[in-house]
Image (spheres, helix red, strand yellow):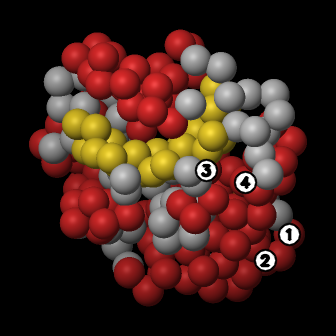
Amino acid sequence: MSTAKIIGVIGETGSGKSTFSDYIQKNYTAYVINADQIGHLVLDEDGIKEALVKKFSEKILVDNRIDRKRLGSIVFKDASALDFLSQLTHPRIRECIIEEIQEKKDKFSLILIDGVALVEANIHTLCDLVIYIYTSKDIRLKRLVEQRNIPYERAIAMIASQKATDFYDHYSDVTLSLDQGIEHKEEEIKHLLQEIL
């Protein structure tokens, strides 16, 4: 079994998962696996890319690679399209994460897995602890538009396509609210990690 403790970081887009993960990486012997980044990479793997083009046509390609903005404009407006994408990519994302855990487990005391769809991809079952990063909808929308330069209508669609708070509550062991920023949560984080390490 792994020597590192594995923490899943779940929450809606724009909630502050990456802010939390970056903070842990800077202050502890931690390694962060970005599940969303892995998800981006697997889009261009041959079998997955072919299946996406077959389903959504070549309009999702730019320079013969999957264009995430074009794909996103389809799947965030259509639940069945999002479901197709998820069923196609989630098993492969989980495989990649297991490989990365095996590679890093003896070098770090903590491995964080950060991503929007950890539960949907059954990645939460790999974790010793699952933390739900909660941030109110208004703050998330503001972050997506102002910090990530996502058009307002697309940001609204992204938020609307995600699960309700109850879903994250159900699958998490701990909820951490980042409405006021991470600097207000340093003591809480310290105690939380003391319990698991």
Pointers 2 and 1 in contact (C-beta within 8 Å)? yes
Q: Which residue type carries mark 4?
A: Ile
Could you tell me how far apart the alpha carbons at marks 2 and 1 are, in whole angstroms?
A: 6 Å
Q: Residue at x 63, y 40 (%)?
A: 5
**Of the image marks 3 and 1, the number of the one nearer the N terminus:** 3
Q: Which residue is mark 3?
A: 35
Pointers 2 and 3 in contact (C-beta within 8 Å)? no
Mark nearest the camera among 3 and 1 is: 3
Count of picture labels: 4
**Of the image marks 4 and 1, the number of the one nearer the N terminus:** 1
- From what the image shows, is residue 189 above or below residue 98? above
Q: Nearer the viewer, residue 153 or 22?
A: 22
Mark nearest the camera among 4 and 1 is: 4
Query: What is the crowding at mark 4: few (fewer than 14 residues within 10 Å), some, or many (at least 20)?
Result: some
Q: Which residue is mark 1?
A: 46
Q: Which residue is mark 4?
A: 97
Q: Which residue type carries mark 2?
A: Glu
Per the image, label 4 sits on a secondary structure element best described as helix
Q: Which residue is mark 2?
A: 50
Q: Which residue type carries mark 1?
A: Asp
Q: Residue at x 82, y 64 (%)?
A: 45
Mark nearest the camera among 2 and 3 is: 3
**Of the image marks 2 and 3, the number of the one nearer the N terminus:** 3
Mark seen at residue 178: none
| Residue 30 picture location, percent across and down | 64, 26
